[in-house]
Amino acid sequence: MSAHEELNADPLTVADAAALLRAGRVCAFPTETVYGLGANATNSDAVLAIYETKGRPRFNPLIVHCADLAMAETVAVFSPLAGELARFWPGPLTLVLPVNADAGLSDIVTAGLQTVGVRIPDHPLALELIAAVGRPLAAPSANPSGRLSPTTAEQVRRGFAGRVPVLDGGPCRAGVESTILAVDGDEVVQLRAGALAREAVSEAIGRPIGVAASEAAIAAPGMLSSHYAPAASLRLDAAAPEPGEVYLGFGSPPAGHDSAVNLSPSGDLHEAARNLFSALHALDATGAPRIAVAPIPETGLGEAINDRLKRAAAPR
């Protein structure tokens, strides 16, 4: 094994991954949503390596992952309303809050903003890893910028051609990224639809949640118009594939197209969200120039699924 291969060898244990991160390296790790490309959020050189590894625009901020609420409160300033929303942690919810002046975060994490996206992931390996590092981890999805998010360790390895060490925690159970909510005074605004349905949060806190305008300034990850894209182009709301297309189905497939990859034959939006990126990875691997995508309802997690599909289909 060469020195380069040793440097990028996958960590076998959480302790191995934590050692890489404490040394200022990047390391991919599992969460309940997708795999993240982690680095010590207080080390500017390490955080910069995330941007360089992904080819990520520097104006696109990063989410900070914490082991518990006590760590999150060192990173961001929590209002009573933000504290109420923290009931969803650990879980697929990111809160955009004012940065704690004493957090010691690299300003590269926030892309110069006075706010920071923070969350506590609901995955035992992720929580164990963050606690072992003893520092919050900046972690966008572990994929080249703008490409499909990975939901397995093997997808991370393929995406970066083995250049990024990855802690393997098995397939991610949610399959799409976290929901991002900005808390400003008594208002809550969804900046990105995700694995936690907006309606569920609204019902739990007893107040409406607005949705950021499509042309809103970038205040959180996942707000770029073109994002989460496969190599193939996408045609959305397709009743059936056209010649030369592969078909991504949902629910009952159209007549004569039973071999299509289906997000959920039963029309279950949770199953569809969990399968979305893996299905797109599989169809992209066929080499087809275009993927036709069946209509997906906009209700519940359908909002997040359609958000990812629209960004994947946007001009590049």
Image: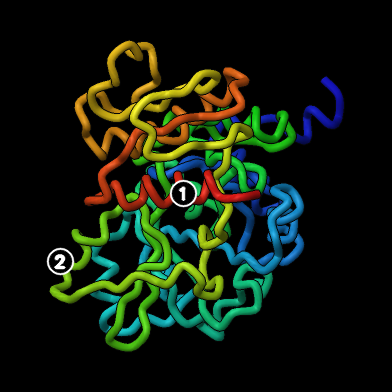
* Residue at image coords 48%, 37%: 235
Q: Residue at x 37, y 53 (%)?
A: 194
Which residue of the protein is positioned furthest toward the front in this rendering? 243
The quadrant in which the N terminus is found is top right
* Helix, strand or loop at mark 2: helix
**Whole-percent x, y for residue 302 in the image:** 29, 47
C-alpha gap between disc 1 and disc 2: 28 Å
Residue 256 in percent (x, y) is at 32, 11
Q: Amino acid at mark 1?
A: Lys
Q: Which residue is mark 1?
A: 310
Is 176 left or right of 6, judged from the image as shown? left
Q: Is residue 46 visible?
A: yes
Residue farthest to the bottom? Answer: 185
Tags 1 and 2 touching, CB below 8 Å? no
Circle 2 residue: 204
Q: Nearer the viewer, residue 122 or 280?
A: 280
| Residue 231 image position (x, y, % from top left) | 63, 34
